[in-house]
Image (cartoon, helix red, strand yellow):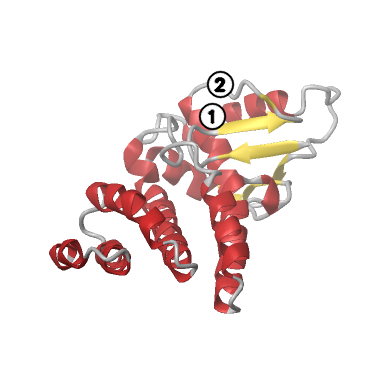
Amino acid sequence: MLSVHVLGPVEVHRDGVPLDLGGPQQRAVIAHLAIDAGRVLSVERLIDRLWGDQPPRTPLGTLQSYVSRLRRAIEPAREAGAAPQVLVSEAPGYVLRIPPDAVDVHRFTTMVNEARTAAAAGYANQALERFDNALALWRGPALAGVGPDEQVRSIVVRFEEEWALAIEDRFETLLSLGRHAEAVPALQVAVDEHKLRERLWALLALALYRSSRQADALRAL
């Protein structure tokens, strides 16, 4: 069973064993296809995501070379001449034929949505567990090591915003369980790392106030 990991260094595992994907650009190809798992990504769009306005002299040939190497890594037992079953050519480009839940970012989104649904229904303990499981999928900065940074920046920013919102929702769920004193140290670390996120400051002030630390709460506002 294949799994793709993009919430951290880009990796593909088969039955838990990491595969050798080659260099950064080949990892970028598999990452972009995994983000759109099950949907065709056009050659034109892939080339733009890989190189922007500075493509190599023969971008199509270079992309085809990357795809060929990735296919050998992903399906090493495929016989010569047999059609690929995972990284498939389909007009106008390529598609990664794996279930979305084989990709960590899609599992993250699913679990966060389930956590929010549980929280809204009043099942705070279940929600907290879901948030924790979702956030545990992050192994570092998203799409780490695929480069160049400029071509993946907008995707990384979107993923990091989704991560930050999940962190905030988790803290809110923790406070709804009355675990204010427990939340304070982690919230203080979070606001130090993300000083511009007003919701984190508000949650910290609330946690301090409910921990009978009114003076500290006022300073956090």
Q: Residue at x 40, y 30 (%)?
A: 56
Percent from the top left, x then y, of residue 146?
44, 32
Checking the image for residue 185, the label placed there is none
Q: Residue at x 47, y 34 (%)?
A: 59
| Mark 2: few/some/many CA within 10 Å (<14, 14-19, 20+) | few
Asked if the residue at tag 2 contacts the one at tag 1, i.e. Cβ–Cβ closer than 8 Å, the answer is yes
Q: Quadrant of residue 78?
A: top right
The location of residue 111, given as percent across then percent down, is 61, 59
Task: Pick out the residue farthest to the front.
Answer: 212
Look at the picture and state if 132 lies above or below 180. above
Residue ID for mark 1: 26
Q: Tell me the quarter of the image containing the C terminus.
A: bottom left
Q: Which quadrant holds residue 181?
A: bottom left
Identify residue type, mark 1. Gln
Nearest to the observer: residue 36 or residue 83: 36
In the image, taking residue 167 as reference, residue 83 lies left or right, namely right
Query: Could you say whether the residue bearing mark 1 is in a helix, strand or loop?
Result: helix
Q: Give 114 or 177, whichever is nearer the viewer.
A: 177
Mark 2: secondary structure: loop
Q: Residue at x 69, y 51 (%)?
A: 101
What residue is disc 2 on? 22
Label 1 packing within 10 angstroms: few (<14), some (14-19), many (20+): some
Q: Quadrant of the N terminus?
A: top right
